[in-house]
Amino acid sequence: MLTRLSRLGPAVPRLFACPPARFVSQSKPSGAAGSPAMTELHPTVDQGGHGEVSQYVKNPDYHGFSSDPVVDEWNMRVAFFFGISLTLVIGSAFIHYLPDHGMRQWARREAERVIQQREQEGLPLIDENYYDPNKIILPSAGEE
């Protein structure tokens, strides 16, 4: 940071020596020099009758679909209707009705069903032995 500040060393006195000034004329304009000038947004360039004329000069509301202004506007409306409105509606419906990812809803329903079944049978919700100890085959001490 200090190396950057040292670069400004020679420029600092020049900044304060001549403060910037803005001069505004208070006299009334006279003649053509004082009249406000109207300029075109897209100036016309005289090409001697050769070359193409920009679509924006022909049609200021050009959307890029067609050279005909009426067809261009209708194509723009149709493109926006299908591109935005239908995409949002159909896309939202498609995402909403996608199948259950990872079967989370099914797993919850199945767990609730098992809990109700075990409560009706009078069994505890979770056994102390998750697996039946009679079915577990343990290795003998000599196999280790």
Image (tube, rainbow, N blue to C red):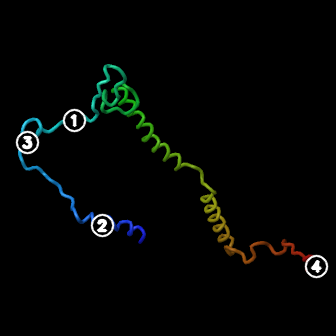
For image coordinates 23% across by 65% down, the residue present is 17
Labelled disc at residue 108: none
The nearer-to-camera label among 2 and 4 is 2
Locate residue 86, reporting x and y percent. Answer: 45, 40
Point out the tag, 4 or 1, that comes first from the N-terminus.
1
Mark 4 neighbour density, 10 Å: few (under 14) some (14–19) many (20 or more): few
Residue tagged by mark 2? 12
The N terminus, quarter of image: bottom left
Pointers 4 and 3 in contact (CB under 8 A)? no
Labelled disc at residue 39: 1
Q: Amino acid at mark 1?
A: Thr
For image coordinates 41% across by 37% down, the residue present is 81
Q: Mark 1 falls on what kind of element?
A: loop
Q: CA distance from mark 2 to mark 1?
A: 41 Å
Can residue 49 be seen here? The reply is yes
Dividing the picture into quadrants, the one containing residue 129 is: bottom right
Residue lying furthest front: 10
Residue tagged by mark 3? 29
Labelled disc at residue 142: 4
- Locate residue 84 relative to residue 23 in the image: left or right: right
Q: Amino acid at mark 3?
A: Pro
